[in-house]
Image: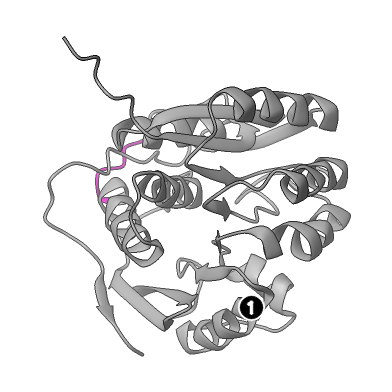
Amino acid sequence: MTAPSPPPRALTIAGSDPSGGAGLQADITVFTRLKVHPMAIPAALTVQNSAGVRAVTPLAPDTVIDALAAVHADMPPAATKTGMLGTDAVVAALADYVAENPLPNLVIDPILRASSGPGLLTDDGFATLRERLIPRATLITPNRYEAELLWGQSIPNAAAAERAAAALREAGAAVLITGGHLDDKGYIIDTLADESGITTWRHPRHPGPSPHGTGCALSAAITAYLAHGLTLRESVRRALAYTLTAVRTAAAPGTGRPYLGDGTTELNESPEEGTL
């Protein structure tokens, strides 16, 4: 009997969320649901629950890079994402590693801080991310506030997000500016700038509190689809549909914000593609 082929491998380098709503734990959940082999390297440990982040303990850069080198040598990922990296030292060490050992399909979620709680990346770390790591990425997935820091201008709505995405695309990586924090009423509009130009998707805003870990799930889903060999644009399209479903099926396991549900649930919903 022929042994079954192993699934494609996807790697996440991010912070650990012991409550399971975001970070490594959320990424592993998404990878598993989308049928890629999940690999995960912590860049920091957090103390948090559904009510918010209370403390962050970054790991030593050597520990992060040694783990990456060990996995990369034995089980090279088809796609990799980074989430919370914590410190300038970790970002710089990762940039050094990627310069010598390129990681295909690198997706960077440039996380700066949690929705509630302490910062998750130092200012120096964000500068190093922008200058040394993002140019080596396939895609970056900033929200409004992260994109504003990268671009240096205000991004109040989807029209401004289109201009920002086009400008940030000049750094080399494709750019997906997520629309959840924009001021557009009634709809969330996500904006992708890639080699084909600008593409937007929109869907109605979900009533009630925003679920925990949405950005992590979106970037993880994109990474999983890239690992399966899909094009970047198709990976983004499917990941947005996955995340929309996960938001629609969210539930509250604790006393704080709801956590995402299973994005593979059949709800027959997907964002509407169009132009502004």
Q: Nearer the viewer, residue 32 or 205?
A: 32
Looking at the image, is 49 positioned above or below residue 80? above
Quadrant holding the C terminus: bottom left
Residue numbers of the magenta segment = 248-252
Image quadrant where residue 200 sits: bottom left
| Residue at 20% in and 14% down | 2
- Secondary structure predominantly adopted by residues drawn in magenta: loop
Q: Position of residue 73 (x, y in %)?
A: 63, 26
Q: How is the image coloured?
A: one colour
Circle 1 crowding by C-alpha within 10 Å: few under 14, some 14–19, many from 20: some
Horizontal and vertical percent for residue 103?
A: 61, 46
Indicate the position of residue 177 as horizontal and vertical percent values: 51, 70
In the rendered image, residue 37, in percent from the top left (x then y), is placed at 40, 28
- Residue 185 in view, yes or no: no
- Residue type at mark 1 is Leu
Does the magenta run of residues contain 113?
no
Residue under the point 65% across and 80% down: 170
Up the image or down, 37 lies above or below 263; here it is above
Residue name at image x 63 percent, y 37 percent: 14
- In this rendering, the count of numbered labels is 1
Q: Is residue 83 visible?
A: yes
| Residue occupied by mark 1 | 168
Quadrant for the N terminus, please: top left
